[in-house]
Amino acid sequence: MNMTDSSTSDLSVVILAAGKGTRMYSNLPKVLHRLAHKPLLGHVIDAAKTLNPAHIVVVYGHGGEQVPNAFAQPGVRFVKQEPQRGTGHAVAQAMPLIPLSGRTLVLYGDVPLIRAQTLAAVCASAQTLVVLTAELADPAGYGRIIRDKSGKFLRIAEEKDATAEEKAVREINTGIVAAPTKALAGWLMSLKNHNAQGEYYLTDIVPRAIAQGMNVASVNAANLWEVLGVNSRAQLAELERRYQHEYALRLMAVGVTLRDPARIDIRGDLHCGQDVEIDVNCVFQGKVHLAEGVVVGANCYIKDAEIGAGTVIAPMSVIDGAKVGPECRIGPFARIRPETTLAAHAHVGNFVEMKKVDLGEGSKVNHLTYLGDATVGRNVNVGAGTITCNYDGANKHRTVIEDDAFIGSDTQLVAPVRVGKGATLGAGTTLTKDAPPGELTISRAKQTAIAGWKRPVKNKAG
């Protein structure tokens, strides 16, 4: 379910996104670095929206207005934390923007792979402070979950303040918590910064909740990768591969064959019918739909496209913003640009480029051709080296080729121009006027043989 302006939820979400990301060595705020072509913060906002919250507040800081400018959208508000004085201080900046009734979930803008199911579990208990935890073989750098002998939650020990015994604990705090908003606001007001960092820790709300007699519960993340944050380019690359691996598993689970699940990149939404086959090193961006039985060859790039059932896309092809009908053949080395539509059984071959073209059913454009701003009818054959001359230096003009026409090789169609139904254009024709239907049209210089002509001979002294 997506968040709407009319949400009746009593849940508020606060996303902390003020960090600079020093180890990224970048002028771009850390949360704007991209994973699967989407900013890290975008992944977190999308996960939050699945809970249908009434309010989403992003706390930003470093990078000036870059963060709010990148995410101007209904239902998401921004507040600046300046100076940055810790996680508790950051959450406190958001409290004036949310009602004290209901519940608040705290997320992090650099933890992009958190799943909606996990967040729902954290938010399930209405009158409890819930902390999302995880078990790490090497917990260095994380706050530790400290419990008594019966397993009851006591506190969270930040590593810089932890004893040697506490540092040996492997259960760590992910930073993600949910609590009754009114209680959270009170705890935040009482935070102290008597610690090694001189900061106001959000984790210090735990002993305050216990002191007030509130139950403190924990939810353990089912997958460690869900709670991993990004602090360096190397970590960003690691999470990118994890994201792609998980997406690949989902595709294979619904009947998609991936020749190598480690060599695919989905940067948006890829929807596939059954028995789709995808070879290695393919990139899918934006919204892409591959119908049943589509085959995609190696090293293809497909963006914002719809591909019909049974179509085969040969290696090294680019399809961007196009709609391709069923049983088509594309490539290799074809480029199909935006606003192009291919009807059923159309063929687009090697080194062919198309832009704003409607290619009719059964038509073939197989070799070394550029078609731009053109309407091509059914069962048309376009020969190698054909060009639509659609641009006069100021404006674009359209070419129309009617059904059953035959366009000879090395033809230039100077738009605006029309080729009639069943017409034939001889090879080498430069068409500047409409070609009548059913007739042969040809324009070429008269062939001449010059008797006695000798090929020049290279000067040996040169």
Image (spheres, rainbow, N blue to C red):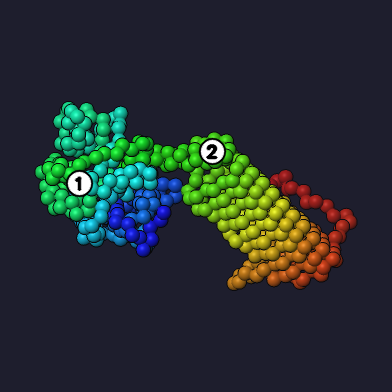
Residue most extreme to the right: 451
User: Residue at (50%, 53%) from the top-left corner?
Assistant: 286
User: Percent x, y for residue 350?
Assistant: 68, 49
**Residue 221 sits above or below residue 421 on the image:** above
Q: Is residue 45 left or right of residue 257?
A: left
Q: Earlier in the sequence, mark 1 or mark 2?
A: 1
Asked if residue 357 can be seen in this view, the reply is yes
Label 1 sits on a secondary structure element that is helix
- Going by the numbered disc 1, the residue's amino acid type is Leu
Few, some or many C-alpha atoms within 10 Å of disc 2 (few <14, some 14-19, many ≥20)?
A: some
Which residue is under mark 1?
Answer: 202
If the image is split into quadrants, where does the N terminus sit?
Answer: bottom left
Q: CA distance from mark 1 to mark 2?
A: 41 Å
Instruction: Give amino acid for label 2.
Output: Met
Above or below: residue 226 compared with residue 9? above
Image coordinates for residue 54, horizontal then vertical, percent: 32, 58
The x and y percentages for residue 448 are 86, 60
How many marks overall? 2
- Residue 195: name its quadrant: top left
Q: Position of residue 257 (x, y in %)?
A: 58, 38
Residue position for label 2? 252
Q: Quadrant of residue 353?
A: bottom right
The residue sitting at 50% across, 43% down in the picture is: 265
- Describe residue 416's horizontal placement relative to residue 86 as left or right: right
Q: Residue at left 23%, top 45%?
A: 128
Q: Is residue 407 above or below residue 316?
A: below
Q: Is residue 395 above or below residue 249?
A: below
Does the image show residue 235? no
Residue visible at 46% across and 38% down?
245
